Amino acid sequence: DGILEAREPRISSTRGRGRPSKVFVMTDSGREKFEHSYDDLAVAALKFMSAQSGEHLVTAFAKSRADDIERKGALALAKSSNKLDALASFLTEQGYAASVETRATGQEICQHHCPIAHVASEFPQLCEAETEAFSKLLGTHVQRLATIAHGDGVCTTYIPNIPTKEPLT
């Protein structure tokens, strides 16, 4: 069923009699069928960092993560003339299932999934830093309207239309 795969055992200096046995290891697909506690581990680690060294360390971690999003996102945006669609595609590749919605006075990036929602619900600094990264990537002010981490159905970031200046007469 794709849960296990057979591999040759590691060669050891002491080997018993008989033909070599197979070693069975769980595949990535197999691991996905089991409950994970990565979120719990991440929350515990961030709580420990905050308790031991202060909340500023959690904020620094969130900023570091956002810098990584910004660096990788900039490469994706450089390949496209439509920055907003490119950002949504990049976020989808990162597991956020993002789309762009047009509104009367701007546009919204909707993230229909959040792979870090459980952690972000405990540490909103992650969402705040991510929002700042979006602003830098798009080169304009953005506003977070909703987050999955706070119980909303989607993460929504609003990007207002930039008014064009009309010449003075």
Image (cartoon, rainbow, N blue to C red):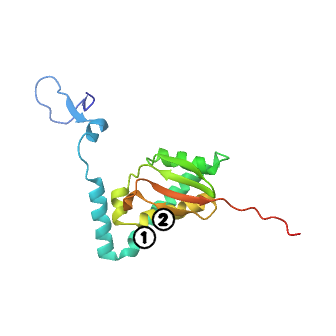
Residue 30 in view (yes/no): yes
Left or right: 161 as drawn, with respect to 24: right
Rendered location of residue 89, percent (x, y): 54, 45
**Residue at the image point whose x is 62% and y is 57% from the top:** 106
Q: Amino acid at mark 1?
A: Thr
Residues marked 1 and 2 touching at CB (< 8 Å)? yes
**Residue 52 to residue 19: above or below:** below
Quarter of the rendering occupied by the N terminus = top left
Residue 10 in view (yes/no): no
Q: Nearer the viewer, residue 132 or 29?
A: 132
Q: Residue extending furthest left?
A: 17
Q: Nearer the viewer, residue 49 or 116?
A: 116
Q: Nearer the viewer, residue 17 or 88?
A: 88
Q: Which mark is residue 59?
A: 1
Rendered location of residue 57, percent (x, y): 39, 72
Q: Quadrant of residue 137?
A: bottom right
The crowding category of the residue bearing disc 2, from other C-alpha atoms within 10 Å (few below 14, some 14 to 19, many at least 20), is: many
Q: Amino acid at mark 2?
A: Ala
Earlier sequence position, callout 1 versus callout 2: 1
Q: Which mark is residue 129?
A: 2
Determine the secondary structure under disc 1: helix
**Residue at the image point whose x is 37% and y is 75% from the top:** 55
The crowding category of the residue bearing disc 1, from other C-alpha atoms within 10 Å (few below 14, some 14 to 19, many at least 20), is: some
Per the model, the C-alpha gap separating discs 1 and 2 is 8 Å
**Residue at the image point whose x is 49% and y is 62% from the top:** 145
**Residue at the image point whose x is 78% and y is 65% from the top:** 165
